[in-house]
Image (tube, rainbow, N blue to C red):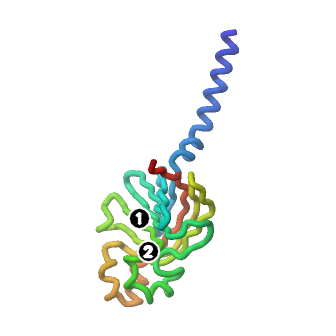
Amino acid sequence: MKSKLVKLLAIFMAIFTFSSCEEVDELTGDIDITIGKETFHIPAATFYSNDSFTIITGTNLKQSVAIKVKDAAVGKKTLGLGKTALSAVGNLGDIASVDNTLVYVPSSGIEKDGMTALYGTITITKKTAASIEGTFEGGGIKTSIIDEMQDVSITELDELITEFSGEFSAIGLTTK
């Protein structure tokens, strides 16, 4: 009898051990973001939605990502000022008031090394009240130079852009 109990406990421990990583992912979500050639894994991601927008946030205590989407319905949307660098150039003055944006904040702070999406796309692949999933890609600029964007030439702008891409799976927050 003792042998059967030990085997049963061993089976339950094995099930728990091999499934715990998946369960944690389901409870916290995650964001993977590549900026230039460097990739960061952010193992804690949540989202909040209201009638006006959805905000997806994640952090690993060294880096944080925040994504704001006006319409979080499944499908592809413009991120930043346009889908490409060329389409964004004509709207540089509107960068502080875009409907869909992504901001990356490293541990050094947003003022020094943070990045804001200048252009790109975000694709929502799944959206329920409990979770949201998708991908993003585009080009961003250091957040510290946003106020100076009016005075930047197209040649200078091209040199300031850093490519980014990634994916997210976030868990919904409720406010009850």
* Amino acid, disc 1: Tyr
Q: Nearer the viewer, residue 152 or 95?
A: 95
Residue 17 image offset from top left, x and y in percent: 59, 33
Which residue position is annotated with label 1? 104
Which residue position is annotated with label 2? 140
x 70%, y 9%: residue: 1
Q: Secondary structure at mark 2?
A: strand
x 53%, y 64%: residue: 166
Residue 118 image offset from top left, x and y in percent: 44, 77
Is residue 26 shown left or right of residue 173?
right
Q: Secondary structure at mark 1?
A: strand
Q: Given the current orientation, which residue lies at the most extreme top position?
A: 1
Mark with earlier residue (2, 1): 1
x 56%, y 74%: residue: 77
Is residue 18 shown left or right of residue 111?
right
Residue 12 image offset from top left, x and y in percent: 64, 26
Look at the image and tell me whether residue 49 can be seen.
yes
